[in-house]
Each structure stands twice: as structure tokens, then as C-alpha cells.
Image (cartoon, coloured by chain):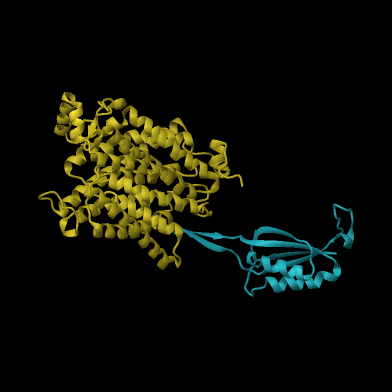
Amino acid sequence: MKLITAVVKPFRLDDVRNALAEVGVQGMTVTEVKGFGRQRGHTELYRGAEYVVDFLPKVKVEVAVTDEFVDRVIEAIIEAAKTGKVGDGKIFVTDLAQVYRIRTGETGDQAI
Amino acid sequence: MTKTKSAVAALVMALCPALALAQTVDSGATAWLLTATSLVLMMTLPGLALFYGGLVRSRNVLSVLMQCFALCCIVSLIWVVFGYSAAFAEGNAFIGGLSKAWLKGVEVNTVSGLVPESVFTMFQLTFAIITPALIIGGFAERTRFAGMLLFSILWFVVVYLPVTHWVWGGGWLAAMGFRDFAGGAVVHVNAGVAALVAALVVGKRNGFPNTAMPPHNLTMTVTGASLLWVGWFGFNAGSALAANGAAGMAMLVTHVGAAAGAVAWMALEWVRFGKPSVLGIVTGMVAGLGTITPASGYVGPMGGLIIGLVAGVVCFFATQLVKRKLRIDDSLDVFPVHGVGGFTGLLLTAVFSAKSFDGIGLPDGVSIGAQLTTQLIGAVATAAWCGIATLVILKLVNVVTPLRVSSEQESDGLDLVLHEERGYSL
């Protein structure tokens, strides 16, 4: 099992959600986050006083998947989130030690 | 009102109050002044409070609203006790006497000009309220409430009341023929200079100018600015103290001045920085309004247009100078917008009052140059008296109670530290 964490541009979120639903993902966690990468920040100007804003708003999508789903899910996210410009985001894949469904007590692939 | 006029009025009143009332109170003027008074109070609460409140960071929003509100209340009390009297009662060239302390003699049937004196004193009180409230923008986000209150009370007594008497209460500037229709010197130069001195004495906010201190809610700021625009009709057109052509023309040139100031500032930003900003357009509007204020009863529509455009340009560059070159933390730009605008407007009043420039005309035998000299004397005298007195008062207050919060309190935010409240629980 893997935990796929994707940080994407906020305006791509609906497309990412739909793409994941199409490949059969049944649940996800979405968080509004801030950060920077190669896109860096932007500047804001108030009555001529210039401020550099380092952290840009992004959306973090977390999906837990069984091993055979990993490639399809990653492809779906890339396809949906890509604009081709700096700042499209990143995908991190980590091993999941265990998963529990709280209501039934199921574990492992059953719980995903 | 001149000495003779008020003496005659008092005599007539004493002989026959009902007759005096019937002869002198103009119901149209009274209705308009009642309305104008409400509009000018609306400029401070909530207009200026929202305008300033949106410009500070979210942890200080309540401190700004609180300062505006508290000043409104305290100035009102001082006004009743002796403020109105010191500004408008018979006195010397410098300050009014105490004959109207506790509003003595201001009764239902007392008349001032075309309106009941109760209306006149209420109208003038709303100007007295907004002036110290304007100053707080200079030292926002770092000043203790107690220090601010003590400073404001002393400043109001030592600066606002005398200067009002000089200009509108029959003092030495009035005698010279100084033209300040609605408060270019009394309100705007006064507030601007005081804010600048206070910003210097209190010192920069921690992190200025390197840390980002963006406005926390520009929607609030635009709401406040829009209320100021409408309220300013009461401010300037109300200053005609009548419901007549002079009031109508004052409203027209005020509106044109605001629009021209806004357009000029927007255009400059667009050219220099590549983007026209919301804060820029509303700041230009306030600059236009502050600058047209002294001229509003004397100039024509084209004068208003030019004064507004000049205001946008001059105040824009003044803001850049104070903030970026001199690095003075006049936090909400009170000096470059109100001080510089008011000063510019006082000088331009001399030019655009003239018949040849579409104005109502200068007094007989007075040239534009001579009027300009009078205007310059009035503006400089106001700035000098205000600057020196503000400095002395701040130093005195700082001995009694600290003006400034500690560094840690400043970073926690004044709302929590001074008022134990939060502006937002989202």
C-alpha cells in the first residue's frame, strides 16, 4: 500500500478530483497549504510599498491506494494537474505500514 | 459671525425671542445642516474607522476601531465643557473665551447665522471629532491606548481649538482674509503634520520597512473610503452653512475633485508599476477630497477638476517620498495624503478663487499673489504651531505614560494585548 501526496495548483483541484474518481479512487483528503518551489513567490504593491510574498497557496491531495493502483493514480494526477508552467506542483509516494477502517476494524487492502 | 452681528442678534433675541427666531432661522438651511452633520459624523464612524481598520494587520483591527470610537466620545465631552467656547466664542485673536463653556446660552431658540446654534455647534463638533481620529493613522499598530488618549486630548485642546478659532472663530487668520472653506488647514494640515511628528516620535513599527505589512482587508478599506466620499458632501457643502448655490457648487467641486484625484493616482500607478490598484484609486480619491476641501466654497467646476488632478499627482509622489526615500513609518500615510493635500489645496485656493480661473472671485483689491501669500502664511503657521505643539505634547505624555507597547506586545497584536479581544474568530 502507498500514500500518494500531491501538491497541486488550487485551480486544478476539481480536475484532479474527477480524474481520480474515474480511475476508481474512492476517497481522498484535501488540505489548503502554502509553500514555494521553483515558482517562488510573487510581489504585492501597496501605495508603492513592495512586499515579496514567499509562500503561494497550493492544495495538498492525499490518497491511500493499493499497490496495483499506484501507477494509474499518479498518471491521472499528472494529467489533470499539469499546465506546463513552473508551479504545477509535486507528487510524493510513501510506503504505508498499515491502514484501519475505524467503523469495521478492517485492515490492509480491505480498509482502502 | 462678527462681533456686531452677534451683539445685535443677542439684543433682538433678548427683546423678542419668537420674532428673532422667525426672522433668522432658515428652515432649508437648518434641514441641510442637520443632514450634513449626520454625514460628517458618518465619515468618522464608520467611514474612517473602516478605511483605517482595513489597512492595518488583522491583529490590530480592533485597536483602530476603538481609537476612532473613543475619540468621538471624548472629543464630544470636551466640546460641550469648553471646546466649542474656546473655538467659537468671543475671545482674542488666538483663542475664544469661556463665555459659552458648558454650552451656556445655547438654547432651543438661540440662532447662529441661518441655523439654530445647537445645529451649528453639532456640525462643528463632527469636524472636531474627525481631526484627531485622522491622526491615529500615523502611529497605528504600535501605540498604547492610554498614551494615545492622553495625547489626543492635549492635542485637541492645544492645537485643534486655537487653530479653529484662528480660521473660523474670528481669530487672526480670519481677520487676514485667509480662505479655508471646510478645513484644509484646520483639519487636514493639522492632522497630517501631527501624524508625521507622532510617527517620528513613537518610532517605526518593528520590521518596517523590510517586513511585509499588507492591509488585512481592502474590502473594508474600500467600504470606508466610499463612506468618506459621500460624507464629504456634508463636510464641504455643509460648510456653506446654508442651503443655497454656494452649498451646491461646493458639493459639485468636491465630487469632481474626488474623481479627478482617484483617476490621477490610478493612472500614475498604472504607468509606474504596471498595474492600477484598488488601494491606489481610493487613496487618490481621499487625496482629491482633502485637497479640494479648503477650496470647495470658492472655486468652480474646472478649478475642482484641476485641483483634484494635482492632488492625485502631488500626494502620490509625497507618499513615495515619505515611505520609500525617507523611510518614515507614517503607517497609513496621513501626512502625504492629508497634510500635503491640505497644504496644496490651501495654495491652489488662491489661484482658483479668482474670477479669471472660474472661481467666485477674490476680495476687492486683492490679487492672486497677495491671496497666495495669505494662504501660505495660514498654512505654514498652522503646520508650525501644530508641529511644535505635537512634539512637546508627545514628549510630555511619554513621561506620564509610555506611548508605545513593548516589542512582544506589538507582535502579539494590540487587540489582544490592550483590549483582550480578537477582531475575527474564524
Up the image or down, B392 lies above or below B203; here it is above
Up the image or down, B224 lies above or below A98; here it is above
- Left or right of B251, for residue B62: right
> Which of the pair B200/B349 is nearer the observer?
B349
In the image, residue B28 lies at what x, y percent?
A: 25, 42
> Which of the pair B252/A43 is nearer the observer?
B252
Up the image or down, B423 lies above or below B214; here it is above
Up the image or down, B382 lies above or below B97; here it is below
Residue at horizontal 20 percent and vertical 41 percent from the top: B174
In the image, residue B146 lies at what x, y percent?
A: 47, 33
Res A99 → quadrant: bottom right
In the image, residue B4 lies at what x, y percent?
A: 14, 32
| Observer able to see residue B119 | yes
Residue at horizontal 78 percent and vertical 61 percent from the top: A27
| Observer able to see residue B184 | no
The chain in yellow: B
In the image, residue A51 lies at what x, y percent?
A: 52, 59
